[in-house]
Image (spheres, rainbow, N blue to C red):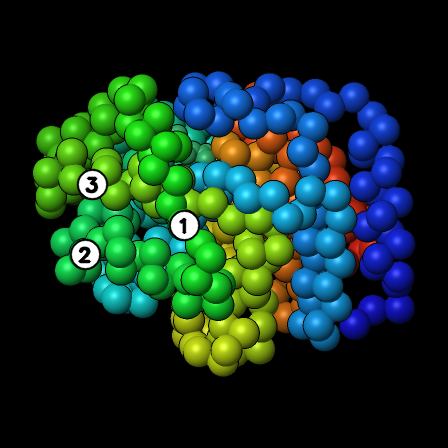
Amino acid sequence: MHKINCKKVLEDIYKDVSSKENKGAIATYIPELAKISPDNFGICFLSIDNEEYKIGDWQTKFSIQSISKVLSLGLAYKIFGDKIWERVGVEPSGTPFNSLIQLESDNGIPRNPFINSGAMVICDMLVSHLENPKEDFLAYVREVCDSDQIQYSETVAASEASVGYRNKALCNFIKSFGNIENEPKEVLDFYFYMCSIEMNCEELSKTFMFLVKDNFKTTKGNKVLSNSKAKRVNAIMQTCGFYDESGEFSFKVGLPGKSGVGGGIVAIYPDKYCITVWSPKLNKKGNSYRGMKFLEAFTTETELSIF
Ligand code: GLN
């Protein structure tokens, strides 16, 4: 794909980042996530030319959390088309992922589908449309990943539900503006399950190849999104994938990407490659500390960024 020896660069950066202090903190606000060892550090790089490089704890499953919001957006976009933009925006919020603040002045229309409020509106659409929302969504994710090994973690979903007061407030608040059709309880249940999906680095990279591959297909060749829709999903990842650190990620890494509070980050170079980094300690904005460091070094050294 590129004259650069990606394998060596990846290994060198992995060693370098591992040798430095692992700053930040695990997302303890979801009690079950607090049990994960902070030393986990895994990488999976997949390219359009079938280069595949895996390092460290790439086989260990982890909670993908907000990374799942790209998958729910993809499914809702496929089902409803541009109608979804009547209920959720495409602007970076500049606020934390679980913020309530803009919803009041925005009349319950979340700024984008990757903050919690926006993801809940997308979940509401799926709950209205799908016959068995949890089963159907999991089947879709398995198809995109081309693996039947993908599961929800009932323990993580229950753990988040037991303390999810802010998410419950968000969902009820949006409902008060009429932008949630179903009962908040039902929407939240689906949302917590969606966030609890577990994958390892390789499964995540394989899943997200649908935003890289020629014509946006799964490894089996099934079309996931039209070219124009995939362009737009990548664009929202570029501008909104890291909440109030989206500008910083774009500035330092120069790729569309999405993070989750489980410590995973997926970044995409459309037409070239997909890379997943997992390290559970998060910076103050809720994004993986080492993940950000790793990806900044990778695109800086290889110049494999879209800018
Ligand atoms: N389930 C998490 C929450 O709602 C997802 C947040 C995230 O990964 N940024 O708080």
Residue 196: give x, y in percent of width and height: 40, 40
Which is nearer the N-term, disc 1 or disc 2? 2
Q: Secondary structure at mark 2?
A: loop
- Closest to the camera, between mark 1 and mark 3, is 1
Which is nearer the N-term, disc 1 or disc 3? 1
Q: Residues within 10 Å of mark 3 (few under 14, many from 20)?
A: many
Q: Secondary structure at mark 1?
A: loop
For badge 3, the amino acid type reads: Val
Using the image, tell me which numbered label, if any, was put on residue 187: 3
Using the image, tell me which numbered label, if any, was put on residue 132: 2
Using the image, tell me which numbered label, if any, was put on residue 14: none
Q: CA distance from mark 3 to mark 2?
A: 13 Å
Q: Is residue 290 visible?
A: yes
Q: Name the residue that disc number 1 marks.
A: 151
Q: Looking at the picture, does residue 66 appear above or below residue 29?
A: below
Name which residue lies at 69% across and 67% down: 47
Q: Quadrant of residue 228?
A: bottom left
